[in-house]
Amino acid sequence: MADNYLENRYNEVFGQKKSIKKIGMTLDTLLIKNRSTRGYKNSFLVSEEVLKKIIGVNTKIASAKNAQTLRFKIVTKETGAETVLKNIKLGGMLPQLNLPLKGTEPNAFIIVCSNAQESRYIDIDLGISLQSMLLKAVEIGLNGIIICAFDKDAIKEAFNLEYNPLAILAIGKSAEKFRLEEISKDQSKKYYRDENGVHIVPKVKLEDLIIY
């Protein structure tokens, strides 16, 4: 009997079987949706389990010398989100808006620390980690923002942190609309909001990024 005779005969009678492949968002889609969000739907509470899932990407990503020095403190509405809010600044280029707008404050945070003294390698790891966690947040339908403008001493003391905090991620369900705007390398890169409140993010076009 020829190889695969029964399978081939089945296909002749009943038609070719088609495998179903589930395709998620592409990397390009994740990157476009991953916008620094300063306003959130206050009615949506981010749980500790969701934050753990986001932190979980750190068990898979690259680390310089595989040192894996980063450590993460989870903060939810129930465990001190208000304290974090009092010690951070958002929207430095839009001071007139006093972001976040009242009623759109984030209610969940990940405080990122390192168990070793900060160095260029740890800074590289930090960038990889923050971007990866934000992409994971987007994948599950959320958004976030990297916060480096915060009172490090106050945060360390308030949460009794053993290590110095390097950055904070705010995570939540976005209440904002965004649009990327292609610009040349010599145009202003300052983000702004149009008359409809859409957050415009200028991005230098590909041709101006490449060195010829």
Image: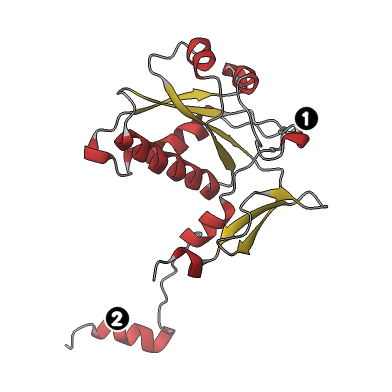
- Residue at x 30%, y 85% (from the top left corner): 8
Q: Say which mark, if any, is on residue 212.
A: none
Q: Earlier in the sequence, mark 1 or mark 2?
A: 2
Residue linked to disc 2: 7
Please identify the quarter of the rendering in which residue 211 is found. Answer: bottom left
Residue linked to disc 1: 102
Q: Residue 3: horizontal and vertical position, in percent?
A: 18, 84
On screen, residue 97 versus residue 156, left or right, reads right
Q: What's the residue type where badge 1 is placed?
A: Lys
- Residue at x 61%, y 18% (from the top left corner): 78
Q: Secondary structure at mark 1?
A: loop
Report the front residue among 161 and 205. 205
- Quadrant assignment for the C terminus: bottom left
- Quadrant assignment for the N terminus: bottom left
On screen, residue 180 versus residue 209, left or right, reads right
Q: What's the residue type where badge 2 is placed?
A: Glu
Question: Does residue 66 show up?
Answer: yes
Q: Secondary structure at mark 2?
A: helix
